[in-house]
Structures are given as structure tokens and as C-alpha cells.
Amino acid sequence: MTTAIYTIVSNNYLHFARTLLQSARKQHPDCDLYCVVVDTDPSPALAHEREFRVLDLLEIGLPDIRRFTFQYTVLELNTAVKPWAMEALLTRGYSEVLYIDPDICLYQPLNEVFSAFESGADIVITPHLLSPIRDDRKPDELDIRRAGAYNLGFCAVKSSENTLNFLRWWQAKLERDCIVDVDRGVFVDQSWIDLVPGLFDNVVILRHPGYNVAYWNLAQRQIKFTDGGQWTSNDLPLVFFHYSGFNPLNPEPFSKHQNRFALSDLGIVATLIREYADRVVSNGAEYYSRFPYGFGSFEDGTQIPDFFRRYYLNTASLRKRMGDNPFECPEALSWNSEKNEKGRIPITWAMIGLWESRKDLQRLFSLDRDSTVYCYWEYFLHEAEMCFSGSVAEKHKSMFQAISPPPVYSVHPKSNSAMTVQAIFMHLLGRDAGVRGMKYLGPLCGNKIGACLAVGIVAATRESRTRGYGLTRLKKTLKHVIAPSRVPADISRAGHVGSHQGGASGRRIQWLPSSGIRMVEGINLIGYLAAELGVGEAARSMAKAAKEADIPYAIIDVGYQSPNRQTDRSAWQQAENRNFDVDILYVNADQTPDTLRYLDHIDHPPSRARIGYWHWEQPKLPEKYLGSFDGLDEIWVPSAFVLEAVTSVSPIPVFKVPHAVEFSVDPSITRSSFGIPENAFAVLVMYDFHSYRYRKNPEAAIAAYKIAARHTRNACLVIKTINAHHYTADYDALKQSVEDLSSVIFLDEVFSRDKIYALEANCDCMISLHRAEGFGLGPAEMMYLGKPVIATGWSGNMEFMNSMNSFPVNYCLKPLDHSVGVYESGIEWAEPDIEHAAHCLTRLLSDPLLSKQIGHRARTTIETSLSPKVVGLQYRARLALVNARS
């Protein structure tokens, strides 16, 4: 035994380990190969004992293994065990041990490493960079400095006393400090190695350009494929390529850790990468990537969130309480005796762990006062469902029931109904709105506690300065709602929340739950309510949801702003002929100022609250629309994608409230109504030319269809458009692009909604290879009908699409090189992978059962998350708080 090569993986990365070790066997047939399995079940790796030997964690001598494996995240643990495994292999008698990351592939023997050993080296490492970075892309040199000068995807050692000293030093660092904490200068095992060339003898820094080629240095390495059939890097042999951050099932982005390249930018290198992706996929990528992480939960199945691991690592008293086996008992997440003083509201270890991990929570919720502890309980119960699963979330709910709330004072200035502080924190600020909701605390400040809350939160929130909210602006806000004599003289910069015997009216206000907040009387729905276009149908979906939630509504139609046909009067059936106190403007940012001017023109009475409902199809709303926020109190958006886009610039709160999807289909409208062959598999492509052909990207959908249609004669392409007469050149080009197809149906006319639904119902699937969507109403409607959808796996449609209920298509992000209508250049849009879309369609064409299974899951998703009843209840809850604030 001379040399051992090893890698480290959890079971969900076994496909990478197999690919690496197969390449190592080819280049070094005489070396022994090992895979260290960082998981509770080694059997998936043991199934490949012909390829490599398996090392279980119990075999490498980790200190206090149960605590060690509990304290680290999956990334941290996989890197932390490295020096123990290295020492264990040296102890078995190997003279040289080489560690290689699983996402590496060897293309040449590691001759330079063995030459370094022969020349006296004990430790061989490779630097991230051999020359400076000269562009402004990521990662830059500061990013490399934070991560560490040397990349520990590779490290080789030779047996010696010097090496043993190095490993023992490294182990001491990683026993408690193998964490991702860039602010402290620690990046798992890697950044510690910056010290090694100065601390230890016989360290060789291998500067060969063929080693450790990866996304961080590819811009400085010229990769070629020679006539002799070899890959080179800067004219020297390419020894190994490090595919860090690479997803073989979606290779186009190249690496999730960078924005310098997409696969399509890499020329001949893309061939190398695609070949590697094929190898990894053939080694079980789809199978192993689904494996759960064995150390990811307590023994009862409750998920362990990463923040709690960090709290455990940093808190000696918690480690002591959880004992020798922290996986055994999530009961340790119960009362935290250190934070619980007699007479105070108790708090749990889990709650403290989350609070310690979040600076925003520390600013908002002081744990020294009962009133804010109670607020934090309300917040945590909302978060617990996402942070934990199983018993921990349920236990906290039952614990909260036993807690008596403290006296909290806040008076609604108009109704005098009581309102809880957690309503202010959770709903008026909003989890997603952050400090942008600060100025809306003003109307609540009808007494001392409200004023103290407002001043305290704004003063304590550092982000407020970057958003333009300081004490000066707050005072101006308060000035309009509170007489100077009513603002407490003792308000300080730190703020104060305490128990006062009298509110603004001098009487004691009793606590009431937030459910006591009154519902609004109704809403004025303002938008393109009759227009035959997507935003018109979305507005009508709000009317349906309002009806299901018993929210009365009136209609103010502003369809004059849209050139589309105005014939859908379905929303009028339940509308009331009266005016309500809350306006919802269902028009986008560019039309909001004109709509507000129109409301003034028709002498629409002043409302207590005005809400804009906006869509946007880029990751950031342009600042040119900042003026559109004027006159609005908050913004609603249909998806997390649009939420991120609008909150990036919004000076007011923004909330996600999705569209409702539910409708019936007229059975009398059949395939013959559209000319669709009865026995064909009908593939639908549908878009409005006014929505920009470049964004909707029908060419990509057609290209994918052409590839898939080669394998069958039983397919039909249905292209449904509107407004083509305004874009005759584009429409002609579209028709020319399908002249080589035998079965294509063009439908360019304005259909009623009933006929649209019937068309969708009479097609078998939809392809939407868009570059961006704010929501994706068409895909959502098809899914409601139980039809499979193939769509770009990015932007608003991912609100309801996933790999189990549809076919999200791989993509890469590219900056727009030219402005497209209202969409500015320079901002990233998706470029879908046409080959992947074609693969998805081919699977549907060849497997009717798969189509049925995906369609069933799709319908279930829409029915459970986007039904008018579900969405209407969200409207109702949000409007109740709007009413309380107004």
C-alpha cells in the first residue's frame, strides 16, 4: 500500500463521488480509492464496493461523534471530517494520501504531486488564482480572499511527523470552527489553510495551470482540445477540472456560485462540461440527489434547522442540556431557563436560536420585556412551520396556549377597538415589507404605547437610514396624527414598550386578540375589468375570490387604457352599486398615475386606503416608476418573484397575495371547434403580442416542439395569439418558422374566457418557454385543468410549479442586451434550455401515464393553494389589518 485517494460525500452526492473515483481509477489504477460517507446509512455507497472502499464516520476517529455531527450543517460537516479521514488513512499504512472533492474529474495523472513528494514536500495545496481577475464579475478577488487563498477541493499529504502536526492542528480548528462565517474570516475548513505555508515546513503550492481549473479561474485559463485528443490549460495538460456549484441536471448556468459564464459562453469548454454532465447523470444523478440527509433531523423525524445547529455550537448550556446524544430528544427545545425569569413570559431554546441568528429580529423584539416577547411568540409560531416540522412546531403551539398575554395598549383612532402589538409587527410592518412600513405606524399612535413603538422601532432599525426613514421623518409623520402634547416627553432613541395605566383617552385598554380587528365593509375594484387580456382576467379572479370570502366589491372600470376588446362583464354580476372605503387599483405601475388622475377626474370620494396590485417581469422594478407609489398606501403582488422586484425600490409595504384560479368548461365546445384532430396530442403555445414576443419567446417553444415531434406523427401544435394584426411582420415570421411542420393550427382572434378555457381543456399540454413571467396565468389555468405544463423554471410561475407537478425547464440568466418595450436592458432574463424542454415533451408524447400523473398533481396544487376560497381568505385577513391601520 502506497497511495490512497479519497473523497467525502453524503448520500445525495454519490453520483459525483462515483464519477470522480472512476476518473481516478483510470488515471491511477494502482492507487486505493475510498469514499467517506457522511450519512447515517452507508448501504447506498456499499452497493458500489467494486468501484471504491467505503469509510464510515465511525472508522475515522471523530471526537464525540454525535455532538460533532449535530453541530454542523451538511456543508460544514462534509468539510470538517477531512483531516480525521486523512489521518485515519495514514494510520492504515499509506505513505501518501490525496483528498479530492467529489465534483472534480481527473483528465491526466497527478504526476506533479508525486514529483513534489519525491522532492521533499509533505503537504501539497493549490491556489484559487494564478493571475489577477480583471473584470467586475463574481467572484472577484475580495470574494476569493474571504473564501481563502487556497482551494481545499484538493489537498495531498505524505506521511511524516510534520504532516501529523499539521493534521492535529487542523483538527483542533475544525472541531468547533468549521463554519461559514465570512464576517469572522472563517469559511469551513478552507480559510484556515491560508496559515499553513507559514506555520509548517515542506509545504508546496502547486501553480500548474492544469490543476483545479474551475469557475473562479477559468477566465485566466485558456482551455483547448488538441489534435492529439487531449485537453490543455494554458498549453499544459489539463489534469483536473473542478465542477463546483454545477448541476448536471441543469448544466447551462455552469455554476450557481458565479455570474461570469453561462455554458453557451464557453465555446469548446462547453463540450468538456456536457460530457462530464452526461457521466454524472449516468452515475445516478436523478436517483441519488433525492436522498434525504441522515443527520438532517432528530430521531423522531423533526427537521433540524441550520440556525439551531449554530446556536447549539455556540451555547455550552444548551449542549449540556441536550446530553450525549442531541439527536435523541427534541424536548430539549422546550423552556430556556436562562432567559426565563420569574414572572416573565417564558421562551424556548428554539426561539432563542432563531432570534440569535437574525439581526432584524433582535432589533424588533427585545427579550427583556413581556410585551415584545409576546409579539415574538406570535412571529415565531408563523416561522416555526417553515423552520421545523413535526413535533417542535406543534409543541410550541400548545405551549403558547398556556401563556397569559401581558397588558398591551393601542387604540384604533376611529373605532376605538383594541389592537395587539403583534398585529403592528406582523402585519403593518409585514415580514416582507420590513422597515418600509414604518410611516404607517403613525395613524396607530393614538396613545403613548403607539408613539413609543413607532419611535423605538425606527430608531433601532439601522436599515431605516438607507431607506430614508430617520427620526426627523418619523416626527413629521407623527405630527399629523398626534398632538404635540400627547407625545410622551420621555421617548428616547432606544424607544420603550411598557405598561401604562392610561391611553390617549386616559382609560385602561384591555388586550384583545388580533381576531377582534374589524373587517372592511368592502372594496372598490379598479382595473381593466372587462378587458380580454391577462391582467383583466387576473382582476376578475380577484372579484371571484372576494365573493368567496364574503367581501363586497364595487367596480370602477378603467379599460379605456387598454386597446384590447372590452366584452367580459362577468365581474359585474356580483358587484354592488356603492362606494367603499378601500380602493384596489388593479393596474400596473406605469398606469397607476393615470388611473389616480382619472379617479380625481370623476370625483371619486377619498378612500381610507389605496392599494396597488402590480405585476412586473424583471428582477427589479425600474426606479423611473418611483413616482407611481405616490398616493398609494401599500402594494399587492401575485408572486414572490414580483415581491422581490417591487420591494427592491418600494418606499411603502409590499405583500404577496396570489391570483385565484377556478373556472368551469363548456362541454359543447370541442376539438372540432378549433380544428384540432381528435386523436392528436395537442401542444398549446399561447400569448398576446402586446405582452412582447421577445419576453414570451414562442420561437423557443416551437423549436422544442420540432425536436420532440420527430419521434411521433401523432402530435399537433396549436398556436393561440391575439393582437397579431398590430405586429404583422412578427406574425409572418412566426408562420414561416413552422412551414416544415405538418400539423399546426394558428388561432389569432379574441376568444371569450369560456372559449379560452375550452381551448385549454381540449389541448393535452402547454409549452411556455418565456424569458420572464410575473405570475403565469395560462400555465396555472392548464394545471387547474389537470394538464401537464412545460415552462421555464424561473420567475413568477415557480410560485406554483415544481418538478413533481409540472416540467420546469432548465435555464441560464443573461442580461438583456437591448430594451424590450418597458423592460430595460442590462437586467437579467432567463434563456430556457430548448433541448431540455424537448426532452420533457418527448417523455409526455411517449408515456400517457406520466401525463396523467403529472396532471393530477398539477390540479391538486392549484385547487389547494390558488382556489378563490383560499385566496379570498388571504384578501380578507389582509384587508382586516388595512382597516385597523387606516
Image (cartoon, grey):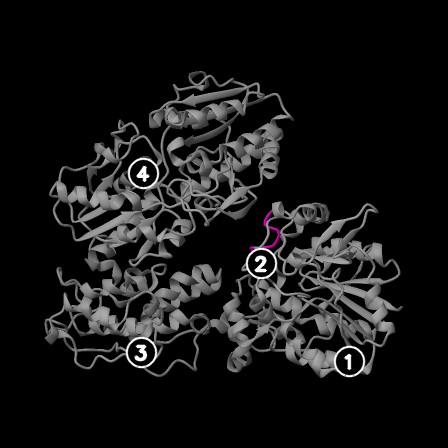
Q: Quadrant of the N terminus?
A: bottom right
The image shows residue 740 at horizontal and vertical percentages of 58, 21
Q: Which residue is mark 3?
A: 369
Task: Tell me the residue that label 1 is attached to.
Answer: 164
Amino acid type of the residue that numbered disc 4 sits on in the rendered structure: Ser
**Mark closest to the chain's N terminus, 2 or 4:** 2
Q: Amino acid at mark 2?
A: His
Residue drawn at point x = 52 percent, y = 47 percent: 814
Residue at image mark 4: 541
Cα separation between marks 4 and 1:
68 Å
On residue 257, the disc is 2
Mark-to-mark CA distance, 1 and 3: 52 Å
Of residue 519 and residue 302, the one placed in the foreground of this image is: 519
CA gap, disc 2 and disc 4: 39 Å
Closer to the observer: label 4 or label 3? Answer: 4
Q: Earlier in the sequence, mark 4 or mark 1?
A: 1
Q: Nearer the viewer, mark 1 or mark 2?
A: 2
For the record, the magenta segment spans: 251-259
Q: Is 400 positioned to the left or the right of 265 in the image?
A: left
